[in-house]
Amino acid sequence: MWNCRRFVYKLSSGAGARPPGIRPFGLWLAGLPGASSKGSHVSGGEALRKGILVLVLTSAAASATAQQSTISDLLQKAAVKLALAAAKAAEPQTIEDQIRFCEIAAPSFKEEARGAELKRAFDQLGLQSVRIDKAGNVLGDRPGAAAHPHVVIAAHLDTVFPEGTNVKVRRDGNVLRGPGIGDDCRGLAVLVRIVQSLKDAGVTTPGTVTFVANVGEEGLGDLRGVKALFNDTMKGQIDAFVSIDGTGVHVTNVAVGSHRYRVTFKGPGGHSFGAFGLANPMGAMGRAIAKIQEMQVPQHPKTTFNVGRVGGGTSVNSIPFEAWMEVDMRSSDPASLAAVDANFQKAVDAAVTEENQRWGKAGTITVTKELVGDRPAGSTPERAPIVRAGLETAAALGFNANLGEGSTDSNLPMSLGIPAITIGGGGRGREAHALTESFDVTDAWQGAQHALLLTVALAQK
């Protein structure tokens, strides 16, 4: 799910354009213990993890002290130019892949069929050690000359739509219509296009790239795919993470965290006439909702809450024995998220107490608050090399880009302090998470080119 709020600046169009203060992209290692006058330095992966990569002007002096790999240098390489041209020329096939993936249903927790199709594609493309981990993530390696830097490029398999949804894609001119066509079938198609174009052009990289089609990004999937990736499957191996999620050309560097609860109120229940006077779980829930709606939250950083679903009861003439609601709270600031969560807890507890006191039945109504979603908040600083790389690669290709915030698979690595961003897959998406979701293919190749060049840039020493 990519629900980005743009908030910093827009790169001016034209090749090489960049916002004020952003220098030509060059990664070098500075001030490292034990660095010799000949430019000895630690591995690119360790540098990325420790945040000691800095951006510098391309100059003879800098070249003398450290090995550089600039975007402009990469764009002069014949193999890279060939790969970029191939990514654009193959856009019709990328769109066919996008449609094919979309027409394989993949609700959260039921991504197996779509995952199998991605595994088949990874195998055909010649990725190494293609496997499906315990969570259901599909992984394939593209080894470089060294193990590090180790970059992960990912897109999520799942959609928000339940089993049984008609996932047939319709074409109306340049517009594709179908549930999940942009979010995130476009990302999956771009993932495949990067691998194919790099292979066809014979591009090699110093570092290793692992391509991942991950499960569980949406809704109650609760980032289970990337949680498994970082906590188990690739624990301690990942130096940089890029999620391709959503459409257009953008760079998301701020993670909007969320807490989601299913709150269940229980009581004895009974006949609405014969048992009148019992405390009512529905009454307690109503009181809780009223209190939640009165909570005050900051506008900056934006912090939100929502009671999204409610249920309970068996008939109009029965006092329900159970009522439930699902609540969502969000903020890009961990402290603000914790604060609104604490106020929510107080509101629910106070509502139960008041309902019991109203009917003189202390302890009759009980409540459980189950945390069903926990997406950590976090950010990758604007001046971090990976963010600059995301912006600089777009600018070098002549594309407009925006910095923004959103809730994506990058939330998890950002919260862990691992360099991470989310980028778009190109094209123009509309009405994501709706049955009427659509994707305009106009200039969609830009997303594939951006993702490809960024992949190569991050996999440099």
Image: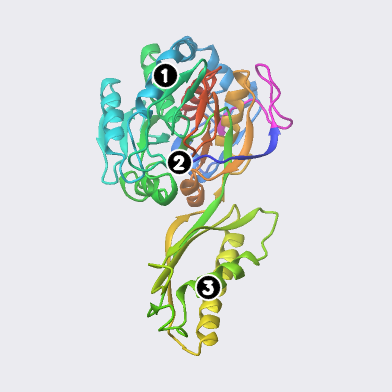
Determine whether label 2 and label 1 are within 8 Å by CB. Answer: no
Q: As drawn, is 401 to the left or to the right of 100?
A: right
Q: Which residue is mark 1?
A: 94
Picture coordinates of residue 8 (x, y %)? 69, 38
Q: Look at the image and tell me whether residue 151 can be seen.
A: no
Identified by mark 3, the residue type is: Val
Picture coordinates of residue 62 (x, y %)? 62, 27
Q: As drawn, is 456 to the left or to the right of 401?
A: left
Query: Tag 3 or tag 2, which sits nearer the N-term?
Result: 2
Give me the residue at 52% from left, 16% from top: 174
Quadrant of res 98: top left
Q: Distance of mark 2 from mark 1, alpha carbons?
A: 34 Å
Give the class, few, some or many, for how many residues have Cα within 10 Å of label 2's Cα (few <14, many ≥20).
some
Please give the label number shown on residue 46: 2
Q: Of discs 2 and 1, which sits in the foreground?
A: 1
- State which region is magenta: 10-31
Q: Distance of mark 3 from mark 1, alpha carbons?
A: 49 Å
In terms of secondary structure, where does tag 1 sit?
Answer: helix
Identified by mark 1, the residue type is: Thr
For residue 328, above or below residue 69: below
Give me the residue at 61% from left, 44% from top: 381
Give me the residue at 69% from left, 25% from top: 18
Q: Which residue is mark 3?
A: 348
Q: Distance of mark 2 from mark 3, alpha carbons?
A: 46 Å
Number of residue marks: 3
Q: Of discs 2 and 3, which sits in the foreground?
A: 3
For residue 208, above or below residue 80: below
In terms of secondary structure, where does tag 3 sit?
Answer: helix
